[in-house]
Image (tube, rainbow, N blue to C red):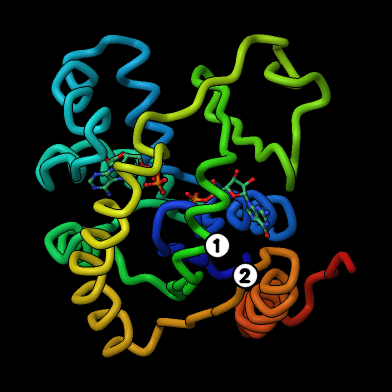
Amino acid sequence: MAKLFRAAIMGPPGSGKGTISKRIAQSFGLQYLSSGHYLRESIAANTEAGVLVKTYVERSMLVPDHVMTRLMLPRLEQLSGHSWLLDGFPRTLTQARALNSLCQLDLVISLNIPYETLRERLSDRWIHPASGRVYNMGFNPPRVQGKDDITGEPLIQHDDDKPEALMARLRHYKDVAKPVIDLYKSQGVLHSFSGTETDRIWPYINSLLSTKMHTQPSDAFQTQTP
Ligand SMILES: Nc1nc2c(ncn2[C@@H]2O[C@H](COP(=O)(O)OP(=O)(O)O)[C@@H](O)[C@H]2O)c(=O)[nH]1
Ligand SMILES: Nc1ncnc2c1ncn2[C@@H]1O[C@H](COP(=O)(O)OP(=O)(O)O)[C@@H](O)[C@H]1O
C-alpha cells in the first residue's frame, strides 16, 4: 500500500491556496480540507458552531483556536487512512501544535505573493457561497457573468475581500503565520514559492509533489499516471 501523505498549504488571503489546492487534489488524489469552506458551511447551516464563528468570519478575525481545532481535528481523524491536503489550517502556532499532537506533516507549502498582486486579485474575487467555488473576473471568470457555473445561482463578494479590510488582514496574517512557518522550517518540511502568477508557480509545486510522493519506497512498483 502507498504511504500516507499529509500536506498543508499556507499563504496570505488571495495567494492562490484554494486554486493550487484544487490542482494538487486533482493531480495527486489527496483529500482536500479547507478551513474557510467548513466555516462557511457551518454558518450557512446555522449550526451551533456556525452561530459562534459567524461574527469572526464576517469581520475577517481569526476564529478562536479551540473552536478551530474542534472543527478540524475530528475531520482529520476520520481520514486516518487517507492522504490529505489542508488549506487554511493551521493558521496559528497553537493550531499547529494541536495538529502536531495528532500527526506529523510530510510537507508544508508556503506561498509568498507580493501585496499588490493580492490586492488586485481579491478585489476581483467572487464566490458561490453554498459550495465555496471561487471565480476571478480576469483569471477564471464564470461562464455567465455573476452566476455560478454549476447551479446558476448568484455569486457574491466577501466583505473581507473589500479593500479596507484587506490591508489589516494581510498585516495580521504575517504576524500570526511567522511562528508557524518557523516551526515547520525547523521540522524540515517547509517549501516556499514566490511569484505573481499561479500558472508559473504550479509546475514547481507539481514537480516537488511528484518527487515527494513517488519516492516513497512502498510506491516503487506502482503504476504511475503521467
Ligand atoms: N489574475 C490572477 N488571479 C489568480 C491567480 N491565481 C489565483 N487567482 C485568483 O485570485 C483569487 C484568490 O485565489 P484563491 O485560490 O481563492 O486564494 P486563497 O485565498 O489563498 O485561497 C481567486 O479569485 C483566484 O481565481 C493568478 O495567477 N492570476
Ligand atoms: N485556521 C483558522 N483559524 C482562525 N480563523 C480561520 C481559520 N481559517 C479560516 N478562518 C476564518 O475564516 C475566514 C476565511 O478564511 P479562508 O476561506 O481561508 O480565506 P482567506 O484565505 O481568503 O483568508 C478568515 O478570514 C477567518 O476569519
Residue drawn at x 50%, y 21% as measured from the top left: 129
Q: In which quarter of the view is residue 53 placed?
A: top left
Secondary-structure class at tag 1: helix
Instruction: Name the one closer to the observer, 218 or 64.
Output: 64
Relative horizontal placement of residue 61, taking residue 112 as reference (left or right): left
- Residue 90 visible, this orientation: yes
Q: Are marks 2 and 1 in contact (CB under 8 Å)?
A: yes
Three-letter amino acid code at disc 2? Answer: Thr
Disc 2 residue lies near ligand 1 with CB under 8 A = yes
Q: Find disc 2 in the rendering and name its residue.
A: 196
* Image coords of residue 120 (percent x, y): 56, 52
Instruction: Name the one closer to the observer, 79 or 170.
Output: 170
- Residue 188, numbered circle: none
Residue drawn at x 21%, y 59% as measured from the top left: 172
Mark 1 surroundings within 10 Å by alpha-carbon count, few (fewer than 14), some (14 through 19), many (20 or more) = some
Residue drawn at x 26%, y 58% as measured from the top left: 91
Q: In which quarter of the view is residue 145 placed?
A: top right
Residue 146, compared with residue 160, is above or below; it is above
- Residue 117, numbered circle: 1
Instruction: Name the one closer to the observer, 172 or 22.
Output: 172
Disc 1 residue lies near ligand 1 with CB under 8 A = yes
* Image coords of residue 182 (percent x, y): 25, 83
Q: Earlier in the sequence, mark 2 or mark 1?
A: 1
Task: Indicate the quadrant containing the C terminus: top left, top right, bottom left or bottom right.
Answer: bottom right
Q: In which quarter of the view is residue 39 placed?
A: top left
